[in-house]
Image: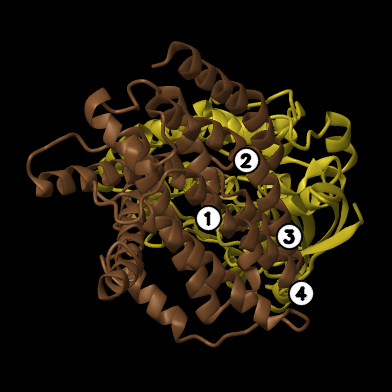
Amino acid sequence: MLEGLFYLLVFPGLGFQITCGLAFEWVDRKLLARFQRRVGPRWYQPLADLIKLFSKEDLLPTGASDSIATILPLVSLAAVLTAGLYIPMAGFTPFSFEGDLIVILFLMSVPTLAYYLAGMASVGIYSILGGARSLLQYFSYEVPLLLALSGPAILSGSWSVADIMASQAELGPFILYQPVGFGLAVAGLIGKLKRDPLDIPKATSEVVAGSLTEFTGTKLAFWHLVMDVQAVVGIFLLINLYFGVPAVYSPWLAVLIFVGEALLMTFVLSATSAVFARLRIDQLAGLGWRILVPLGLAQLLFVIFMGV
Amino acid sequence: MTKTTIPIGPQHPLLKEPISLNIDISGEDVLGGSLRIGYVHRGIERLAQERTYVQNVHLIERICGICSHVHTTTYCYAVESLLGVEIPVRAQYIRALMCELERIHSHLLWFGILAKHVGLEMVFMHSWHNREIVLDIMEALSGGRVIHAANQIGGVRFDLDAEREAMVRNMLHKLEEQVGGVLDGIVHETSIRARTRGVAPITAEQIRQYCVVGPVARASGVDVDMRRDDPLPPYDRLDFNVITHQDGDAWARTMVRVEETRESLKLCEMILDQMPGGPVTTRVSRKVPAGETVVRSEAPRGEVFYYLRSVGSDHPARLKIRTPTLAALSLIPVQLSEIQVADIPVVLAGIDLCIACADR
């Protein structure tokens, strides 16, 4: 009982993931700032922003449903936190079971749906545009992402993230076997996180802040938490599927390697968001279905027939 | 899908200055739009009639926050032509140097805005970082970063000694090195190209029909540049290329401004090389003889037109200013069709709006 509560609330649950989320946001913002020749925020800035948002007045436009607007970010946060529970942290896997990869992917899609509903529920015209865009974007990135992520699963013969990770200790990191799949997965993750260059649903110059335009205060703070935790869960998932943790004798060394891999992934995400301009939604759909999906299929066929 | 109207402005993250656009959309497609302006009308033309010619220099400098110098330059040349005064050649060169620096400053600012609108903040930051160098040069010259107070009727208010000239040359070299990287980045970055190429093309006929001038006109192949067509001194003695492009889309507008920035950098060097010695002011009378005149000059956004009528007192009887943005604004509703919602920022950026100039 006590152990279960510890897992849920401290590690690898709520406390750990929110800390990681805020740390990710800081590293990301700092890196982005350095790319842009800015100084960037102090380490506590994401937490300070969060506290500030929690203390702000909570407003919604007339006609928007307060209960729906409250439930959506909470459900999203619960979904991504639950997804995070099933992901092995440097080999530590308390809840692993066969097929948890599929559960994680399902849970990570919940925020996208909630984001769409949030746009529709908060009646503003920019919110509705942003919400519609987020669904359009979902159909473009989700298929290549799923195609890519099934590669490591087929290669290791298991749909459990822990088993996929463990099999890389013998076979070597799967990124060496499936570099194309890794690229697709990163592209899909960027789309899922709505980060530049795929921040189409919340493009400031086009739709103000997308679905979240009308959100303020505590609800907005929860949305920010959702985005941060979703990002770290996505990063942890990808490093488990593509890098693994090599068999080392010291668990601390494994933790260090894991953190290093996570920082590397953060760097990849920050660098991509720094150097590309935002795509148009039709360009994204074209990219997704004309380039990424065929590449994903080719990668999948390669994995199935070659058995490597 | 049904037709919806989205309001852009008077306040919107996209806009730096207030205009109001009501854009009809259906899903992601833009069907059309209407435009309302006049939010920053300050009655400057009327105010100018209340003040003396000398006081007006200060008023006119405040028309625009970016091209403030070219406005006073044009005004001063207009007053001087009514006075029948020719200012010293050195003063002409200093005025032109400030004009070219202002063009670089304005274009660098514009690259940043375009990059921000297409979601590439890195170019925005780097471009504006370089813009700081230009502002520093202007500050070193005149003492002001944005409002330079460089002009007075009959000359300019500061002179360059050898030490400051060397300093300006050094800063220009530094700027040239750094800006080259940013400009190359803009030219070669495929994602900028993907967002601007083929977006909202304007034909040369439309340009003539709507009297559009400046980089927007040159991007559509209309070869107009007041620096060459109706040059104020010393542009008749300077050798430069007028950049034109044939495509007329947002990409062409970007390319024209990239090349113009390079050309202006060369012009700055040329002006410093050619600049003769001598005084920078002449004494002029406070009362201006009766008469009327028209002076045109090339601001960063295109032709600035000044009409000035005097009745022999120390106040102008009428001052009419035509700025390039007003004509370009009339093209916005034309461009707002057959594009997507995501192209609206690119269309608005492409014109390089200066609402303060247009509304006055």
Label 2 or label 1, whichever lies nearer to me, is 1
**Horizontal arrangement in the rendering, residue B152 relative to residue A38 (left or right):** right
Image: A89 above or below B250 = below
**Chain to which the residue tagged by mark 2 belongs:** B
- The Cα atoms of the two marked residues, 4 and 1, are separated by 65 Å
The residue beneath circle 3 is B358
- What hue does chain A carry in this figure? brown
From the rendered image, report the letter of the chain displayed in yellow. Answer: B
Q: Amino acid at mark 2?
A: Leu
User: Which quadrant of the structure image shows residue A273?
Assistant: top left
Q: Mark 4 and mark 1, same subunit?
A: no
Tags 4 and 3 touching, CB below 8 Å: no
**Horizontal arrangement in the rendering, residue B109 relative to residue A203 (left or right):** left
The residue beneath circle 2 is B232
Crowd band around label 3 with a 10 angstrom C-alpha radius: few (<14), some (14–19), many (20+): many
Q: Amino acid at mark 3?
A: Ala
Image: B229 above or below A239 = above
Label 4 or label 3, whichever lies nearer to me, is 3
Tags 2 and 3 touching, CB below 8 Å: no
- The Cα atoms of the two marked residues, 2 and 3, are separated by 23 Å
Q: Which mark is on residue B46?
A: 4
Image: A172 above or below B192 = above
- The Cα atoms of the two marked residues, 1 and 3, are separated by 52 Å
Q: Earlier in the sequence, mark 4 or mark 3?
A: 4
